[in-house]
Amino acid sequence: MIPSTGYPYWMFQALAIQNGKEVMSGDGLTTYFDDPKVVETLEFWKSLSSEHGIMPTGTVEWGTLRQAFLEGQTAMMWHSTGNLTAVKNNASFDFGVAELPANVRKGSPTGGGNFYLFKDTSDEEKAAALKLIKFMTSPEQAAAWSIATGYMGVSPAAYETEALKAYTQEFPPALVARNQLENAVAEFSTFETARVREGLNNAIQSALTGSKEAADALREAQAAAVRQLRDYQ
């Protein structure tokens, strides 16, 4: 098995939730990187290679993972739904898709690209932006995007379109991620998200590569996050 580490914080959040602990508070002001259950999560991830031998040691780059799966270099991968259509179109073998597993509970961080309306813009600009957003998120466009990529349709109405109904009937794996929304949680987000995520990503990779113990790496990431979030509390 190869879990990609192109977005290690996302995978780590999923594993932590499945172990019964969120990595941040809902208001984005507090992180729990050094919580015992979170530390246990990183130790488990490391054990997949060091103890159980079911994934390569170290880290695996996001960009090479899909090709490794298609070429038969791994029997299982954990990747973005945005790769589903590419795998469907290029796999020379039968494959299956499953929801993320659970330990204490099920849980999948769900997020992606966003549209924003900025307050410091003209009414004309806001109207134009809103027009684009409405078009891009319309059921027909969402259905087309889902079919073309594998990403979920952004609204229930997308799954009521004739196009997506026909596609999911022909290819049921396209419904797995949608059905998993029942156990979804918000993708990792705090104030100073980029900086806080970077600290967490570094901690994960240092533990997976063996340069630091999981507890030490996460303790350092937590201390850095506390400093970065202090001004917002």
Image (cartoon, rainbow, N blue to C red):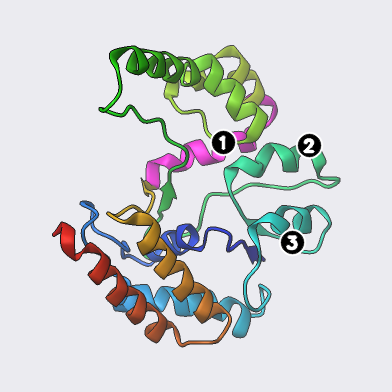
Looking at this view, name the residue that lies furthest to the left: 233
Identify the image quadrant of the N terminus: bottom right
Does residue 80 belong to the magenta stretch? no
The answer to which image quadrant residue 173 occupies is top right
* Left or right position of 125 against 211: left
Image coords of residue 98 (percent x, y): 58, 49
Q: Which class describes the residues within 10 Å of circle 2: few (<14), some (14-19), or many (20+)?
A: few
- Whether residue 71 is situated above or below residue 35 in the rendered picture: above
x 21%, y 58%: residue: 29
Identify the magenta region.
Answer: 169-183
Which residue in the protein does label 2 denote? 89
- Nearer the N terminus, badge 1 or badge 3? 3
Q: Which class describes the residues within 10 Å of circle 3: few (<14), some (14-19), or many (20+)?
A: few
Residues tagged 1 and 2 counted as in contact (Cβ below 8 A)? no
Which residue in the protein does label 1 denote? 151
Q: Is residue 106 visible?
A: yes
Image coords of residue 94 (percent x, y): 79, 46
Mark identifier at residue 75? 3
Looking at this view, name the residue that lies furthest to the right: 92
x 50%, y 80%: residue: 207
